[in-house]
């Protein structure tokens, strides 16, 4: 095949990149290796992690359209109560982690609807399920990428003027010879206060395999996982006990805390604390990531709430899944850890009434779209990252470093984001690293490799460090990154120029940023002190 833009990876960054290019008339081939488009929001089954001002500002217009499309889908197709239907900022799960906790299949439907006109018009071709296996290069340019169908068959080679890497792990970087970084950089390299003395390229955030559960009458206990005893005894040094427990370190102060777990607590979903600045955090495991609150639906529609499990006990610390000999073996082990956690919940977890085990818990593979009851794909927090024209460091946005000055203002801003630097325990044995951050911008230079001319980062593989990945990896920032990358590739095609030239030429940069603004991309934060 031949196209103008090849976008490899159909997660949030890839979808946003495709939409940005398609709305300017480009021809796009988009690939995805799993059954659902949407990445961390859908196939990985992670409700959106967003900042406190998301309903007012701080996201792109197209991301806002995705969010409102999800709410509208519930209003059109779900048996909501009249109060829930009238709730302007409808949160179908009434979960406290996000103002928009919802079932992943709904996001799939909305994403497909956003892309449908371009598929029908013939300008978008989606190859699914395909993953990249090799690439051809010509000097400092990528000329083509070869993809393999997940279930076998002939290979497909796509040549394109621009190639965007929107994969979850930066898979195109080694295939194309694009220079990249993994793991923890050294303090000498980055000057970051939280960095170690020596680089640790194999030290990456844990992956997790999420799953959805509900609780109904009956005994739904699954078969005992083969390595259940291993995971039952598993105890990281800093954990304060076995990983399969309701005890875990507090991300902010590392104190060992006790979580609570009460299926179907009968709470008032309209009283949920949805303001993340006031949220008590993940101490209540059932309501924290609940994706369906049955009280918001007409009586009898849901037998139970549905809870999404993305808890500390399913973080897989044994190995990274990037640049290791057999990544699939570690993903399989992470899946077994998740099944072991579920089996522990069914059989040994302490109950509020003093008993043990919740046999009424069910895996909801129908909700996550899988045969084994788990999410289709592992939740990847940390990717390979390009060696970029500009690398974002902790001191660019740390509240401790920047204080009242706020985050660094980039002349080449291509968007905004906000989240604490939130690093889960890692494969190198580090505990949580949690650093307060200022509302930040996305520099265009972080999307552009130092050498390769026509490949752009369109997701978590942009030029962050291990540390700043902790706040640039979240849903709306990944979307904005992809949208900026897709818009930049389209702009370069229309102007006969290059990404590097756009960044380096003040007139071109101003024109490109004006293009972003016209399409609803915010480049600067308002004064948020009053919000």
Image (spheres, helix red, strand yellow):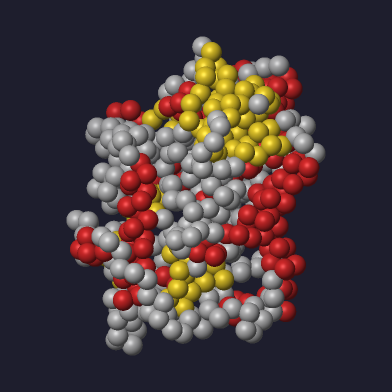
Front residue of 117/240: it is: 117
Residue at the spot 60% in from the left edge and 60% down from the top edge:
105
Q: Is residue 128 left or right of residue 336?
A: right
Quarter of the image that includes the N terminus? top right
Q: Residue furthest top?
A: 139
Q: Residue furthest right?
A: 121
Q: Quadrant of residue 447?
A: top right
Residue at the spot 63% in from the left edge and 56% down from the top edge:
107
Front residue of 509/259: it is: 259
Tell me residue 239's x, y (percent). Answer: 24, 60
Mark yes or no: residue 188 visible.
yes
Q: Residue furthest bottom?
A: 353
Residue at the spot 58% in from the left edge and 45% down from the top edge:
12
Tell me residue 64's x, y (percent). Answer: 68, 52
Tell me residue 338's x, y (percent). Answer: 36, 60
Question: Does residue 52 sit above or below 527 in this rendering?
Answer: below
Q: Is residue 352 left or right of residue 454?
A: left
Q: Quadrant of residue 285?
A: bottom left
Question: Does residue 322 sit above or below 113 in this rendering?
Answer: above
Mark yes or no: residue 507 visible.
no
Question: Does residue 217 sit above or below 458 in this rendering?
Answer: below
Residue at the spot 39% in from the left edge and 62% down from the top edge:
311
Tell me how many marks there are: 0
Quarter of the image that includes the C terminus? bottom right
Front residue of 7/62: it is: 7
Tell me residue 119's x, y (percent). Answer: 74, 41
């Amino acid at each position: 095949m031949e196209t103008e833009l090849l976008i490899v990876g159909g997660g949030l960054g890839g979808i946003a990149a495709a939409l940005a290019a398609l709305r300017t008339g480009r021809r796009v081939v988009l690939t995805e290796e799993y059954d659902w488009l949407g990445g961390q929001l859908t196939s990985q089954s992670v409700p959106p992690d967003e900042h406190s001002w998301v309903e007012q500002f701080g996201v792109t217009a197209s991301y806002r359209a995705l969010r409102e499309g999800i709410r509208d889908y519930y209003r059109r197709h779900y048996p909501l109560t009249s109060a829930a239907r009238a709730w302007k900022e409808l949160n179908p799960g009434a979960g406290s982690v996000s103002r928009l906790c919802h079932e992943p299949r709904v996001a799939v439907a909305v994403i497909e609807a956003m892309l449908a006109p371009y598929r029908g018009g013939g300008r978008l071709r989606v190859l699914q399920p395909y993953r990249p296996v090799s690439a051809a290069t010509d000097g400092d340019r990528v000329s083509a990428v070869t993809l393999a169908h997940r279930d076998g068959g002939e290979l497909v080679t796509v040549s394109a003027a621009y190639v965007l890497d929107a994969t979850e792990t930066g898979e195109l970087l080694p295939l194309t010879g694009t220079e990249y970084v993994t793991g923890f950089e050294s303090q000498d390299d980055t000057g970051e206060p939280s960095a170690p003395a020596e680089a640790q390229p194999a030290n990456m955030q844990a992956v997790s395999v999420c799953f959805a559960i509900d609780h109904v009458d009956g005994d739904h206990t699954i078969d005992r996982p083969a390595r259940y005893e291993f995971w039952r005894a598993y105890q990281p040094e800093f954990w304060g006990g076995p990983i399969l427990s309701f005890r875990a370190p507090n991300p902010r102060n590392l104190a060992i805390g006790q979580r609570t777990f009460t299926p179907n607590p009968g709470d008032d979903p309209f009283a949920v604390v949805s303001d993340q600045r006031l949220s008590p955090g993940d101490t209540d495991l059932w309501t924290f990531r609940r994706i369906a609150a049955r009280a918001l639906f007409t009586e009898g529609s849901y037998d139970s709430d549905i809870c999404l499990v993305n808890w500390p006990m399913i973080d897989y610390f044994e190995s990274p899944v990037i640049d290791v000999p057999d990544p699939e073996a570690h993903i399989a082990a992470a899946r077994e850890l998740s099944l072991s956690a579920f089996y522990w919940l069914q059989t040994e977890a302490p109950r509020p009434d003093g008993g043990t085990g919740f046999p009424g818990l069910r895996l909801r593979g129908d909700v996550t779209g899988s045969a084994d009851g788990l999410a289709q794909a592992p939740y990847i927090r940390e990717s390979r990252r390009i060696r970029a024209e500009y690398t974002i460091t902790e001191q660019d946005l740390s509240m401790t470093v920047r204080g009242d000055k706020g985050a660094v203002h980039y002349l080449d801003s291509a968007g905004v984001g906000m989240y604490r630097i939130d690093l889960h325990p890692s494969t190198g044995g580090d505990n949580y690293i949690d650093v307060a951050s200022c509302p930040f911008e996305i520099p265009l230079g972080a999307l552009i490799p130092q050498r390769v001319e026509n490949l752009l980062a369109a997701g978590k593989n942009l030029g962050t460090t291990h540390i700043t990945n902790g706040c640039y990896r979240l849903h709306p920032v990944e979307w904005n990154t992809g949208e900026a990358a897709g818009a930049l590739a389209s702009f370069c095609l229309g102007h006969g120029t290059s990404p590097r030239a756009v960044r380096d030429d003040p007139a071109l940069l101003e024109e490109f940023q004006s293009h972003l603004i016209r399409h609803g991309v915010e480049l600067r934060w308002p004064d948020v002190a009053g919000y």
